[in-house]
Each structure stands twice: as C-alpha cells, then as structure tokens.
Image: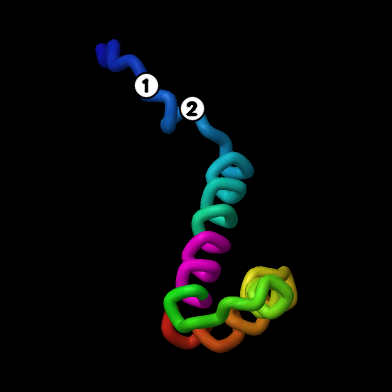
Amino acid sequence: MDNKIPNKYELLTGANLAFIGDAYYELRIRKYLIDNKVSKSNTLKNLSVKYVSAHAHHLISLEIMDLL
C-alpha cells in the first residue's frame, strides 16, 4: 500500500497549471523583448500582446503542429 503524501504541486488542477504556464510564458516574452533593447512601454505592451494573445498561440500552434 502506498501511503505517499502528495506534494502541493500534485494537487493542482490542469487549469491551475495552465494559468502558471501562461504567466511564465508571458514573463519569458517580456524578458526577450527587454533583452532585445525594446524600451518604450507602449511598444513593450503591443509586442508582448502580439506573442501572448490567444490569436498568437493559435498561429504558433499551426507553425509547430508538424513538429509534434
């Protein structure tokens, strides 16, 4: 009999994990933009939305579908 106590991450739902993943992805995009010398706040916002929006995710998924 397995009496293992689950850690807190094992108790997260798929929706919780997706929420955390989306936040991580957005932070990586923002870091990428800043690392590439984008400094105007309006430009940062517009470019980050270009990569992080549902529409952007759809376009990215179409591009990588054959690789999966």
Residue sitting at x 68%, y 80%: 43
Residue sitting at x 55%, y 81%: 38
Report if residue 57 is visible in the image: no
Say whether residue 38 is left or right of residue 35. right
**Which of 43 and 57 lies nearest the eye of the viewer?**
43
- SS for tag 1? loop
Q: Which residues are magenta?
A: 25-33
Please tell me whether residue 48 belongs to the stretch shown in magenta. no
At which x and y percent is residue 44?
Answer: 64, 74
> Pointer 2 and pointer 1: residues touching (CB < 8 Å)?
yes
Within 10 Å of the Cα at label 2, are there few (<14), some (14-19), or many (20+) other Cα atoms? few
**Which of 15 and 47 lies nearest the eye of the viewer?**
47
Compared with 46, 31 (above or below) is above
Q: Amino acid at mark 2?
A: Leu
At which x and y percent is residue 19?
Answer: 61, 47
Q: Amino acid at mark 1?
A: Pro
Compared with 44, 23 (above or below) is above
Residue, disc 1: 6
- SS for tag 2? helix
Q: Quadrant of the C terminus?
A: bottom left
- Cα gap from disc 2 to disc 1, whole angstroms: 7 Å
At which x and y percent is residue 53?
Answer: 71, 70
Say whether residue 39 is left or right of residue 56. left
Q: Examine the image and state in which quarter residue 61 appears.
A: bottom right
At which x and y percent is residue 13?
Answer: 57, 36
Magenta segment's dominant SS is: helix
Residue, disc 2: 11
